[in-house]
Amino acid sequence: MITAAICFALIAVLVKQVKHLPLMEIVFFRNIPLVIIISGMIKKTNIPPFGNNKAILILSGLVITIGTITGFYAFTTMPITDALTIQQLNPFFTFFLAGIFLKEKLNFRQIPFFMLAFLGGLLVIKPGFRIDIFPAMIALLSAICISFSHSTLRHLRLTDHYLVIINYRSYIISLVSLIILILQKSFIIPNSSDFLNLALLGIVGLIAQITLTKAYQHAPASLVSLYNYSQIIFVSAFALLFFKEIPDTFSIIGAIFIIISGYLNYRYKPKKT
C-alpha cells in the first residue's frame, strides 16, 4: 500500500503536468499500458479473462471510472496537495462501507479518529471560504467513489484473480473515456514532452493498480485504506519540488489532522482473533 501511495502521488504530479490536454485524453492514455500489459499477462497465465463475479466486476469498474475522472479533474483545477488530501477522506467512507457491504467487524473506537480526519478534510476544503469550491466538491466525490471501489476490491478477492479485476477496471475506464473523447471531438496530438508524461502516467498507473489490488486482497479494507494517508506526505513533497506549491495554513493543519488520524487508527487497530 505504501508503494501504491507513492505511485498515486506521482500520478497527481503527472496529471498536473499535462493539464492543458483534454481530461478524457489524459484518462485514456493513463489506461493504455494497463489494457495491453494486463491482457497479455492474463493470456500468458491462462486465467479465464471474463472472471466469475461479473456484476461486481462491472460495478467496480464503473465506480473507479467516476473516481478516476473526478480525481483527475481535481488535480488539474486545484493545488494537487489539496486535491489529494481531500481524497484521503476515502478511508472514512471505506470504514462504514466495509461494515455494511462486506460484513467486516467494525471497531467503533476508531470513529473519533475518523471524525478527526473529517475535520481535517473540512479545513482543506474550506467550505464558504474558497472560490474554487466546485473542484473541492469534485475531489470529495472522487473520495467517495474510491472508497466504494476499495470495498469492491475486498469483496472480489474471494471470487476473482487480481489480474482479472484490474483488467475489467482498465477496459471500462478506457472505453468510457474514449467514447466521451470522441463525442467531445477534443483530441489533441501530444508533443514529445506530453507523450513522455502520458507514457509515464500509464506505467505508474499500472504499478499503482497492481499494488493497490494486491493490498486489498491480503488485508481488511478498513485497515489497508489507512495507509492511503501517506500519499499526503509524498504529494506535498512532489508539489513543492515540481510546482513550488505551498499549502496554506488551513490545508497544512487539515493534513496534519488527517495524518494523525491515520496513525491513531494504525496504533489502535483491532487485533486479529
Image: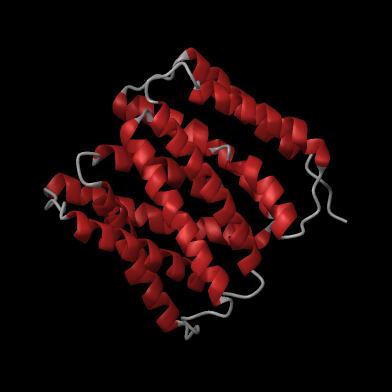
Left or right of 248 in this view: 90: right
> Closer to the camera, 49 or 239?
49
Check the picture and name the quadrant holding the C terminus.
bottom right
| Residue 227 placement (x, y as % from top left) | 61, 43
Residue 242 higher or lower than 105, as above or below = above
Residue 46 higher or lower than 238, as above or below = below
Left or right of 34 in this view: 268: right
> Closer to the camera, 19 or 229?
19
Left or right of 157 in this view: 145: left
> Closer to the camera, 28 or 141?
141
| Residue 222 placement (x, y as % from top left) | 69, 49
Q: Residue at x 60, y 61 (%)?
A: 152
| Residue 263 placement (x, y as % from top left) | 68, 33
Q: Is residue 156 visible?
A: yes
Name the outermost residue toward the right.
Answer: 273
| Residue 188 placement (x, y as % from top left) | 13, 51
Residue 94 higher or lower than 243, as above or below = below
Q: Is residue 3 visible?
A: no
Q: Residue at x 16, y 51 (%)?
A: 186
Q: Residue at x 70, y 59 (%)?
A: 101
